[in-house]
Image (cartoon, helix red, strand yellow):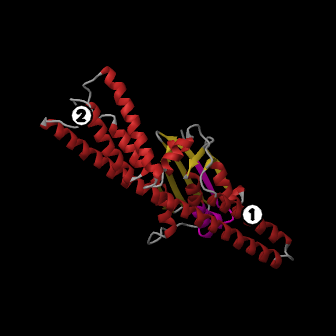
Amino acid sequence: MRVDKPGGWLSAFARRGLRPGSAAAFVFALLCVAAATVLRLAIDLVSPDAVPFATYFPAILIAALIAGTAAGVVATLTSALVAWFMFVPPRFTLIHAQPWETIDVGLFFFAAFCIVWVAGRYRAIVRRLDTEEAYRKVVVDELGHRVKNKLATVYAILRHELRGHRDVWDSVAGRLRALSAADDFLVAGESGGVALTQILEMELAPYGSASVTMRGEPMTLYGKLPSVMSLIVHELATNAAKYGALSAPNGGIDISWTEDGDDIVVEWRERGGPAVVAPEKHSFGTSLIERSLGAFDGAARIDFAPTGVVCRMRFARTHAAPPA
């Protein structure tokens, strides 16, 4: 596994973990208990009366998260035995007569088994998410491959049919190349960052740059936000080309973005197109636009103004900053 950041191998190991029930898992659990014991002995030099079981709780948590529930149970039982023998007076004996000592051990087992149970559920969720992510990647890769094949087929058919109409073919070919670039970007997944202007230019290239104006300071989007913004702009552009400003000879689109406190506000405003009439019900595309930014602490709203569609998009400014 490739590790790009210092210490990344540790994060990868923590997420991948060890096979539950394996010898390595149980050895790891015992090593966690040993480390907790060494730490408790070090504390004992300063404070002999410290809580006997204090250092064992993180050891049990780490063992359960990395090595599984069975390893967590082994770490719990071993921790209880070692702490009882070494740190509960009278030390180095397993015989104790004080009732409160028995209660302390009972509380330790209760807390420890709660930790093991929660860690087991968390580990199961992480494994399921990893499986779903791997499946999603396979599906997206396959979808990207099929889209490329279909677009290549359309390209070949149109090239053949329009071989006698050079001007028409040049215009169509340019738009097909722009659509192909947009599809490549969409299926590429997360990246180190994509400029907002790059997303807008890529999605609007098939319709000509003369009808589009952009205003705003340079801005880069990170994580999954570029793909989501690409989907939103693609939906807006498609609707504008079918029914709105881009369907009219003199129509155009003004796009601007500004900072508003902790948010970034992007406004899409159409002009010069046919008169706009609000639809009687929300279409799938409208619902997609309005819901897509929820995961980025934002929202989108479409107003069907008579002079042209206006879409205001808002998302947290943290998504326009490099990840830590």
User: Tag 1's secondary structure?
Assistant: helix
3 inside magenta stretch: no
Q: Which residue type carries mark 2?
A: Thr
Determine if residue 298 is in view: no
The part of the image, by quadrant, that contains residue 181 is: bottom right
In the rendered structure, find residue 177 and report the number of the disc placed on it.
Answer: 1
Q: Is residue 227 visible?
A: yes
Nearest the viewer among 129 and 31 is: 31
Residue 134 quadrant: bottom right
Q: Earlier in the sequence, mark 1 or mark 2?
A: 2
Image point (54%, 49%), residue name: 266
Location of residue 120 with respect to 155 vertically, above or below = above
Q: Mark 1 belongs to which amino acid? A: Arg
Q: Where in the figure is residue 186, as x and y percent of width and height?
A: 62, 59
In the rendered view, would you say 149 is above or below 289?
Answer: below
Q: Residue at x 50, y 53 (%)?
A: 312
Residue at image coords 65%, 61%: 251
Mark 1 or 2: the one toward you = 2
Q: Which residue: 59% across, 65% down?
A: 138
Front residue of 283/181: it is 181
Per the rendered image, the range of residues in magenta is: 234-256
Pinpoint residue 41: horizontal percent, then vertical percent. Answer: 35, 27
In-image side of 121 versus 101 (left or right):
right
Q: Is residue 160 left or right of residue 58?
A: right
Per the image, label 2 sits on a secondary structure element best described as loop
Q: Residue tagged by mark 2?
A: 93
Rendered view: 288 above or below 122: below
Closer to the camera in the image, 9 or 179: 9
Callout 2 environment at 10 Å: few (<14), some (14 to 19), or many (20+)? few
Residue 249 in the magenta stretch? The answer is: yes
Q: Position of residue 197 (x, y in %)?
A: 65, 49
